[in-house]
Image: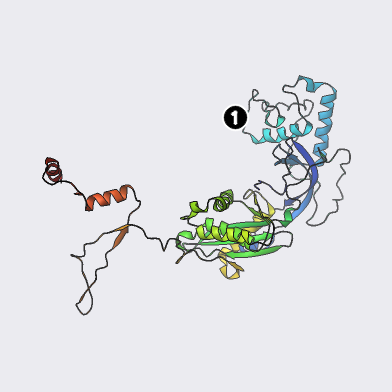
Amino acid sequence: MISIQPAHSIQPTGHCEYWVHEVCHMDQIDQNAQPNEQESQPISYSTVLAACVYGTDGKCKGMLTPERLQILRQKYNEAKSTGLHHNVSPPLQSFASELVGLFVRKAIPEAKWSTTRVSNDAHIRMPPLGAPPPGFNKLERLKPDHLLVAKRHNRDTSLHPGQTTTTQIQDKSSPHLALKVADWKKIAYTGGSCICRDHQQIIGAGVYIPDTNRIHHVNPNGSNITNTVHRAELAGIAAAVTHDYFLIATDSENFMRQIRKQIRYPELHTYHIHHNLLETIIKAIRNTATLSIKFLKVKAHTGIIGNERADQIAKHAAKHPEVADTGIKMAGHEGNPFHNIIWLATSTDDPNIHPIIDNDNQSQPYQPHMRYLPNKRDALQAHMHKVHKLGNSQTDTSYYTYYQNQE
């Protein structure tokens, strides 16, 4: 399963929807704190009551306060009762579709506004900039919500003293809405980090489970060509699967596809640089105690609490490999997964000109300096032509004489 924001997305219904419910909002990080303090301290967050607006695909398009939702609903009903909706073409679908249109219209650059682009649903109907959206003709432009007024503190479920109730409006556009993930805190968020220290590249990975506040520092054991952030990301996923977590979130869609490819077409990954690590993940998936494992795609660096915390843990594991509680086996000899693969090479020296002499002045078998051929096509053809240029040709012909004169 691939979802951009699994914590806020719902099961798609094929229609635009809205839902007033509690969401978690990450607090601002103290920028004056030392980097080590930022990595070791858990990310604080607040629970807020917000109206989430969803597109036809079930993804959250934006949020607004319940009070703002109530105002928009009231103005929408007023425009509908006065007959203003009859002049809109194409016809309005629903109040939820107009809410989606507001958020999508805000996200599209001003240069792309067009009055001619219309659709069956209002979330891609784009009126000119500054004009009121269809269905909200009497509504003045409202300032954006910078903070949700229904703010609550970390795990406290009591309403803020100054919070007003929202019983005047229905909390759902449909009674059958359901989140894709019932509790985001049960997701195992994974992350990888690659930093440079003393002109050397070091990597680390981390796993974070918000429900139990459990963390795993992972040592990817990367070296040489495998000492990359790609191995760090895969190492985090491998650690989560090894520890039998059934909901695993990552911000790398590429490696979700690589895992799927490894399951369906393993022969295509025979010479993949992370082939051994992908095999480890697939083996752990098949031997896991859970019935099924779901992978979720989350956006990177957008304030998703679990993902941000996993990145902190990965960075800490990279700087302090001694704290790692989970280790990944190194790929091949000294981090080279291709150490046992034989490849074509050619000698760059002449053993008749540069013999090797030991201390007793006795000749030893010559060890030529080898140069690997970059490919098996034109490089191999050029080498074979240089060494075996005569081939099976007849040397008593004019073609051979002409060829010799060209050298």
| Mark 1: secondary structure | helix
**Mark 1 neighbour density, 10 Å: few (under 14) some (14–19) many (20 or more):** few
State which quadrant residue 210 falls in: bottom right
Is residue 66 at all visible to an observer of this figure?
yes
**Toward which corner of the image does residue 191 lie, by quadrant?**
bottom right
Check the image and name the residue furthest to the bottom. 360
Classify residue 242 as left or right of residue 388.
Answer: right
Asked whether, in this view, residue 76 is left or right of residue 7, the answer is right
Question: Is any atom of residue 206 visible in this view?
Answer: no
Q: In which quadrant of the rendered view does residue 236 lie? A: bottom right
Task: Check disc 1 and report the residue beneath it.
Answer: 111
State left or right for residue 51 relative to residue 359: right
- 256 relative to 327, above or below: above
Residue 233 percent coordinates (x, y)? 57, 56
In this rendering, position of residue 394 left or right of residue 127: left
Q: Closer to the camera, 261 or 227?
A: 261
